[in-house]
Image (spheres, grey):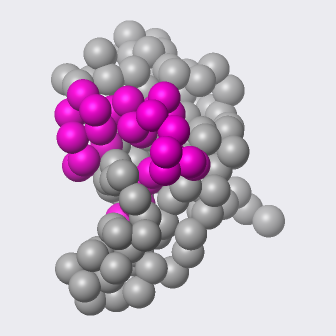
């Protein structure tokens, strides 16, 4: 894995948290994007070589979304750590051989022009790990 690409933070409301993180990081949110495959809204901030991604459920009122489920169990806060990889399929194969459990069998289209795959936190000390590979166009 090349580096931490971003840290994902689960929030209840992007409307509240975007201005908060703009103040905190002293930089503007450069992109917001809905990710249909995950049913989430995301907002991105550059922090040097790495990024912060805020994630909220698509519908703020949807109590059954994955993010609200996470928040009801653990509160708002760090949701996942994403690592940049060069070849996501090779990395997925390597991790499966090492006994890790993938949450999706095939890479899927994530936010911010990435192919992504998540690892089950039960095999990673409770930390949700995301692999991401830039989609070259
Ligand atoms: Zn992410």
Residue at image x 41%, y 86%?
A: 28
Q: Is residue 97 left or right of residue 90?
A: left
Q: Where does residue 102 sit, x and y in percent of width and height?
A: 50, 20
Q: Where does residue 119 sit, x and y in percent of width and height?
A: 43, 26
Report if residue 22 lies within the magenta region. no
Residue 44 visible (yes or no):
yes
Q: Quadrant of residue 6?
A: bottom left
Most extreme residue toward the right is: 137
Residue 118 visible (yes or no):
no
Compared to 120, does 83 lie above or below? below
Q: Where does residue 91 sit, x and y in percent of width and height?
A: 51, 33
Q: Is residue 128 left or right of residue 104?
A: left
Quadrant showing the C terminus: bottom right
Quadrant showing the N terminus: top left
Report if residue 74 lies within the magenta region. yes
Residue at image x 34%, y 88%?
A: 27
Q: Where does residue 108 sit, x and y in percent of width and height?
A: 67, 38
Compared to 128, does 35 lie above or below? below
Residue at image x 43%, y 70%?
A: 15
**11 or 2: nearer the viewer:** 11
The residue stretch that appears in magenta: 50-79
Q: Quadrant of residue 88?
A: top right
**78 or 93: nearer the viewer:** 78
Q: Is residue 40 left or right of residue 95?
A: right
Q: Is residue 49 left or right of residue 84?
A: left
């Amino acid at each position: 894995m090349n580096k931490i690409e971003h840290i994902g933070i689960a929030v209840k409301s992007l409307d509240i948290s975007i201005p908060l993180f703009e103040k905190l990081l002293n930089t503007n949110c450069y992109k917001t994007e809905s990710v249909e495959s995950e049913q989430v809204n995301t907002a991105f901030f550059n922090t040097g070589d790495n990024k912060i991604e805020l994630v909220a459920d698509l519908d703020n009122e949807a109590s059954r979304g994955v993010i609200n489920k996470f928040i009801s169990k653990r509160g708002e806060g760090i949701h996942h750590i994403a690592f940049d990889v060069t070849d996501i399929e090779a990395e997925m194969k390597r991790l499966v051989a090492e006994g890790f459990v993938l949450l999706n069998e095939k890479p899927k289209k994530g936010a911010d022009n990435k192919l992504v795959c998540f690892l089950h936190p039960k095999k990673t000390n409770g930390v949700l790990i995301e692999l991401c590979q830039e989609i070259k166009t």
